[in-house]
Amino acid sequence: MTDHTESLETAACLWEAVLNFRDDPSTNSDSIERTLAVRATFREIGTAALRLIVIGWTDAVEADWRRVEDDYPLCFDWDFVPEWIASHVDWSSSTGPILRCDADDVCAQYYTADVPMTLQVLLHPARSEADARAALLPILKAIEQAHLEETWDDSLFRGARLRFLPHRDRMALAPRRREPPQ
C-alpha cells in the first residue's frame, strides 16, 4: 500500500477503527477498559486533534501490513487495523494516545515534541474570533517555519518538560472546547 489512494483508505480505516473502539465495546474486560479510555481521550483532546493523531499512524500501519500481508489470513480493514491499534496504542495518557513501538517498528522512526505552551495575544475587546485567529496565524507559521528549518533556540525550552511521542510531523490548530458555564 504505497500509493496515495491506498494511504487515504488506510487513514480512513484507522479512524473508523478508533470510532468503533469508542462506540462498540465487546464484552471482554480489555475492550471495555479501552473503550472507556478512548472515550476519555475524545473528551480530553477533542475529535479534531485526535483525528490528526490517528491518521498520523498511516505509514506505520502500512509498513507493518506489508510485512505480514502474504501470511495474514484475515482482511486489512476489519481485522488487521483494529488488531494493530489494540496492540500498538496506549490510551491511558490524558494528553492523547501514545504508540508503543519496538525498535524495528516504523512508528519508532517518527516523533513529535509535545511542548506545553500558552500563546497569548492581546486583542482589542471589540475584535471577533476570526480576527483573533488571523492574529495567531503569523505566530503559528513562524513556529512551523522554525520547526521545518530546525532553527529552534534551545534556550526556549530550558526548564520545560518535553515529551516525545511517536507521531507524524503535523501542525494543526484544533478548535478549543468551550467549558459549560458553572
Image: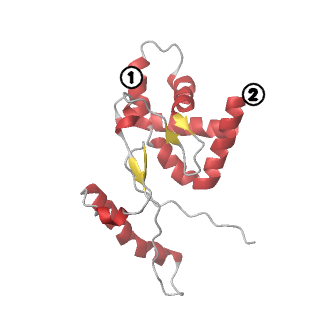
Residue 30: x and y in percent read 68, 30
Q: Nearer the viewer, residue 138 or 108?
A: 108
Residue 7: x and y in percent read 40, 35
Residue 3: x and y in percent read 34, 32
Color theme of the render: secondary structure
Q: At 51% across and 32% down in the image, what residue appears?
A: 88
**Mark closer to the chain start, 1 or 2:** 2
Q: Amino acid at mark 1?
A: Arg
Identify the residue position indicated by label 1 in the image.
66
Give left or right: position of 19 versus 143.
right
Q: Residues within 10 Å of mark 2 (few under 14, many from 20)?
A: few
Q: Nearer the viewer, residue 157 or 66?
A: 157
Q: Amino acid at mark 2?
A: Thr
* Total tally of numbered discs in the picture: 2
Furthest residue in direction front, as rendered: 159
Give left or right: position of 35 versus 12.
right
Give left or right: position of 181 versus 61.
right
